[in-house]
Amino acid sequence: RLYFFLAVQKIPNQYPLSLLPEMCRRPQWDSRLQLAPEQDSYKKNKEVMLSCPDGFQPPFTHVKCGREVQSLSHGKPIYREVWLGRNSRGVWIRIRSSVECIDILQVVPETLEISSTSIKLNWTCSLPDACQRMQAVCSLAGPSSPPCEAEEVKGEEMLHGQEGTFTCPPLQPFTVYSVTISMPPSTILFIWLVRTKETVPDKPEKLWLDPNTGSLRWKALPSCKGEIIGYQLNITARSAQDGGFLEMERLRLSSNVTEHGLPEHSPSSSYVVTMQGLTAAGAGPASLWEFQTNSSGTAQPLDISCRSVGDISPSRGTAVLPLYPISRPPEAAMEHQLIVAATHNSTAVEGACLGDPQPFNASRQPDAYVAAVINLTAPMDFVLGEGTRGQGFHNAALQLGWDYTVLLRLVCRSQQVPTTGVAGSPPDSWHGTAIGVVVLLALLLVSAGILCFLLSR
């Protein structure tokens, strides 16, 4: 019998693979790279496919190993391995750095623009050849439900080139949308859930007087266009006993309040009510409601009535006003302010009641200014225009030929209805303001008069 023995010599691990003319080690590149076929070593000039997880792309899809002379040893070449990658033009080029998986698409968060009706983003493609079939889509992030039903949008766009801007079509405020950029068949490169910004709410639709309690009631607004943080309620009431006496309440109520008592007056008082919803974006349009508490049911116009003021001195620019304290329940702190407005317009007069007049400016007379701050506890005659000054007020001389409206305002500073601040501001401490005597002066004219207001806000 004849026996043959085959001896196989194992190559030591430390034997430099680069000395093997036909083999290359597996490259030490990005751990996310997937090589096909998956091996520890590869034959020279054998093409290897590279791939990355979804959303990433290698700079080369095909690579192969080769060798080049590193040095000579005793006249013999010492080789070292090199890797070549095939570029988009099909040319094999030397790879001189580590190969990594690259984000195909970049969206810089600082470039995102969000409004109440639109979403816009800027995108950049790091590998233009891989971005030719990208598609951007805007859609509702989830189903909507009453009362805040949102319409589905059809925002689709094919993205081309190396960079660009994608804008969603007109959207609805305060609604969550999904912005997705993908490549076929199902590779998602970018997905983002975003809520459009708030806008002012719709006007309240349901407002009524509760016949049992006599309170004003309303249906709470839904947070469809923004989180409802409160209500602005303005109530103007005229007393039947004195047609010139008005009580005006200006209140900011918290969002969980849906009822408010009306000012107490005689059975035939008339009321004008306006209400607005509030979000962080501001106040929405107002609902207007007018009614009377008597049987006629007809709202009477809230016009201005006048009483005579006789002691006017055009030469000195003064007028003597009979003032009477405004009767109000005791408050933490009260002061009477005498406000002068150079107008007869009733709308401007109401604005002077509600606003904060600016200090008197001799070079440019303001629409309204504080002439005096008075500790009025009993009836008195006050000389308007005598020139006295104080902290925040100036009793300036009246100008010849000008028409003036003078308001006596009672400011009651106290904590009132709880409220939530708008647009991130802290809750405010509201103070009530009572507008008492309004004296209408017409210098050098035949008639003048007195109008009484009362304001609480």
Image (cartoon, helix red, strand yellow):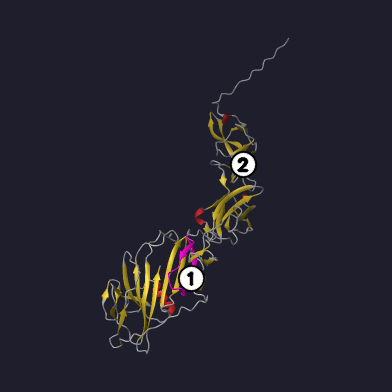
Secondary structure at numbered mark 1 = strand
Note whether residue 126 is visible: no
Query: Quadrant location of the N terminus?
Result: top right
Label 2 with label 1: CB-CB less than 8 Å? no
Q: Report the front residue among 159 and 73.
A: 159
Secondary structure at numbered mark 2 = strand
Instruction: Give whichever of discs 2 and 1 has the lower sequence position.
Output: 2
Q: List x then y, in percent, for residue 296.
A: 52, 77
Going by the numbered disc 1, the residue's amino acid type is Val
Identify residue for label 1.
273
Residue lying furthest top:
1
Q: Dividing the picture into quarters, in which one does residue 326 lie?
A: bottom left
Residue 328 is tagged as none
Going by the numbered disc 2, the residue's amino acid type is Ser
Identify residue for label 2.
51
Residue appearing at x 59%, y 33% in the figure: 24
The reply to whether the magenta stretch includes residue 376 is no
Q: List x then y, in percent, for residue 101.
A: 57, 43
Q: Residues within 10 Å of mark 2 (few under 14, many from 20)?
A: some
Q: Does 359 sit left or right of 71 as displayed?
A: left
Q: Could you give the CA–CA distance between mark 2 and mark 1, rounded to whole angstroms?
A: 69 Å
In this rendering, is residue 215 above or below 33? below
The span shown in magenta is 257-280
Q: Report the front residue among 155 and 366.
A: 366
Residue appearing at x 58%, y 42% in the figure: 94
Front disc: 2 or 1: 1
In this rendering, is residue 179 above or below 354? above
The reply to whether the magenta stretch includes residue 272 is yes
Query: Quadrant location of the C terminus?
Result: bottom left
